[in-house]
Image (cartoon, rainbow, N blue to C red):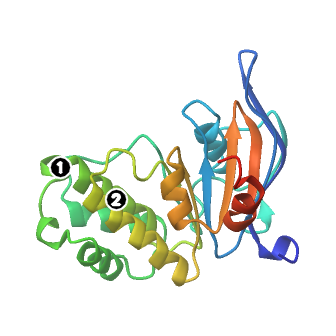
Amino acid sequence: MSGQADTAISLTQVTKSFRGHVAVDALDLRVPRGSVYGFIGPNGSGKTTTLRMIMHILYPDSGEIRLLNEQQTAASSDRIGYMPEERGLYKRMKVRDFLTFFAGLKNAPDPRRSVDAWLARLELTEWADKKIQTLSKGMSQKVQFIATVASNPELVILDEPFSGLDPVNTDVIRDAILELQRGGTTVMFSTHDMDMAEKMCDFICMIFEGRKVLDGTLEAIQDRYADET
């Protein structure tokens, strides 16, 4: 990596506390452009708090965050797609209408075409004119994923994208993430599933109780800890 130009996300000594509890403690983190970056750790380790700070939903108590080589921007940035852990969909809207509306908010150049392509890619075309409230949990999660990526963002941030998915839909979302990477998109996702991170990620950062305990390429981490893991 050759400096900031090759970095999609940069955190420098970022700290966040809630009522005296340190949720994220002096975190340094670099996500290389074009990578799939796994952000791993047990529940309560500070992953979601970190992602919310990256997306400007929460503000750090101290430290600096830069996205796409710019000072931290608002979560509405058209260059970034974000899927929160708490899924939020307009349940009474039809699937295609919701996704086209959402892609339009992010200034996608051709929202309907992009949405239809993703509906076909994730095998949801026959549900396009159904109300979201009629979908299964797995289908709803795929709709949420499409809402995140249909505007063709440069950077995609996914909070626990595989949570609650059955094995078939897990494979569908995993393949879609790798397809995004092949198209040049940087993807950062949080998970507590080390096996999934090993299958997908170029780089891994593990945090525990708000502090970084592992960081680097998958190969480097495996070489360093092979005898202990």
Q: Is residue 79 above or below residue 212?
A: below
Residue 12: x, y in percent?
A: 85, 50
Q: Residue furthest front?
A: 227
* Number of the front mark, 2 or 1: 2
N-terminal label among 2 and 1: 1
Which quadrant is home to the N terminus?
bottom right
Q: Residue at (26%, 72%) from the top-left corner? A: 119
Give 31 or 91, whichever is nearer the viewer.
31
Q: Is residue 79 visible?
A: yes
Q: Which residue is mark 1?
A: 136
Residue 67: x, y in percent?
A: 72, 62
Q: Dot 2: few (<14), some (14–19), or many (≥20) neighbours within 10 Å?
A: some
| The quadrant where residue 99 appears | bottom left
Relative to residue 98, is residue 175 drawn left or right? right
Q: Is residue 153 above or below residue 23?
A: below
Relative to residue 109, is residue 27 drawn left or right? right
Q: Residue at (33%, 44%) from the top-left corner? A: 164
- State if disc 1 and disc 2 touch (CB < 8 Å): no
Q: Residue at (16%, 52%) from the top-left corner? A: 135
**Gap between marks 2 and 1 measured at Cα:** 14 Å
Relative to residue 206, is residue 92 drawn left or right? left
Label 1: which secondary element: loop
Q: Which residue is mark 2?
A: 170
Label 2: which secondary element: helix
